[in-house]
């Protein structure tokens, strides 16, 4: 059963699914899942992610300890002075 256009018949790809959805699935007590031998495959990605987060923490500690937020907020003139603050170092 498709949709009739001017010269051709377009098939509905969902038509098969609609007809087979009428019967409910039965419980199978012997079914063990789609794969019997499952294992965790994302350990390497998880470790890389934790290393990356640790690196971000280290950078944040150095930025907090040695950084100066005024250098990000205010512009610097040609003499390396913060505008409105004069010579800093």
Image (tube, rainbow, N blue to C red):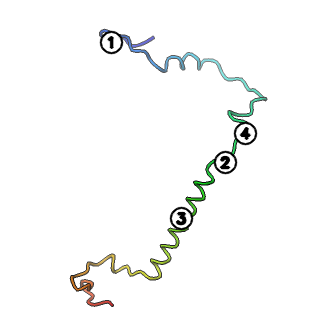
Sequence-first tag of 1 and 2: 1
Mark seen at residue 71? none
Q: CA distance from mark 1 to mark 3?
A: 57 Å
Q: CA distance from mark 3 to mark 4?
A: 31 Å
Q: Residue tagged by mark 2?
A: 40
Q: In this rendered view, identify the residue nearer to me: 37 or 9.
A: 37
Sequence-first tag of 2 and 3: 2
Q: CA distance from mark 4 to mark 1?
A: 50 Å
Residue for point 39% across, 14% down:
10
Q: In this rendered view, identify the residue nearer to me: 62 or 44.
A: 44
Work out which residue is located at the far top of the displayed protein and give it.
7
Q: In this rendered view, identify the residue nearer to me: 61 or 4.
A: 61
Q: CA distance from mark 1 to mark 2?
A: 50 Å
Q: Position of residue 27 (x, y in %)?
A: 74, 26
Work out which residue is located at the far left of the displayed protein and give it.
78
Residue for point 45% across, 11% down:
1
In the rendered image, the vertical position of residue 12 relative to residue 78, given as above or below: above
Q: Residue tagged by mark 1?
A: 5
Sequence-first tag of 3 and 4: 4
Q: Position of residue 9 (x, y in %)?
A: 38, 11
Point out the frontmost of discs 3 and 4. 4
Q: Residue tagged by mark 3?
A: 53
Are there few (<14), some (14-19), or many (20+) residues within 10 Å of tag 4?
A: few
Sequence-first tag of 1 and 3: 1
Q: Residue tagged by mark 4?
A: 37
Residue for point 63% across, 47% down:
41
> Is there a contact, CB below 8 Å, between mark 4 and mark 1?
no
Q: Position of residue 31 (x, y in %)?
A: 74, 30
> Is there a contact, CB below 8 Å, between mark 1 and mark 3?
no
């Amino acid at each position: 059963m498709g949709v009739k256009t001017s010269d051709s018949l377009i098939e509905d790809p969902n038509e098969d699914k609609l007809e087979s959805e009428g019967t409910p699935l039965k419980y199978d007590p012997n079914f063990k899942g789609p794969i019997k031998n499952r294992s965790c495959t994302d350990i390497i990605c998880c470790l890389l992610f934790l290393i990356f987060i640790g690196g971000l923490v280290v950078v944040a500690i150095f930025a907090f300890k040695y950084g100066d937020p005024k250098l990000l907020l205010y512009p610097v003139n040609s003499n390396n002075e913060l505008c409105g603050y004069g010579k800093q170092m």
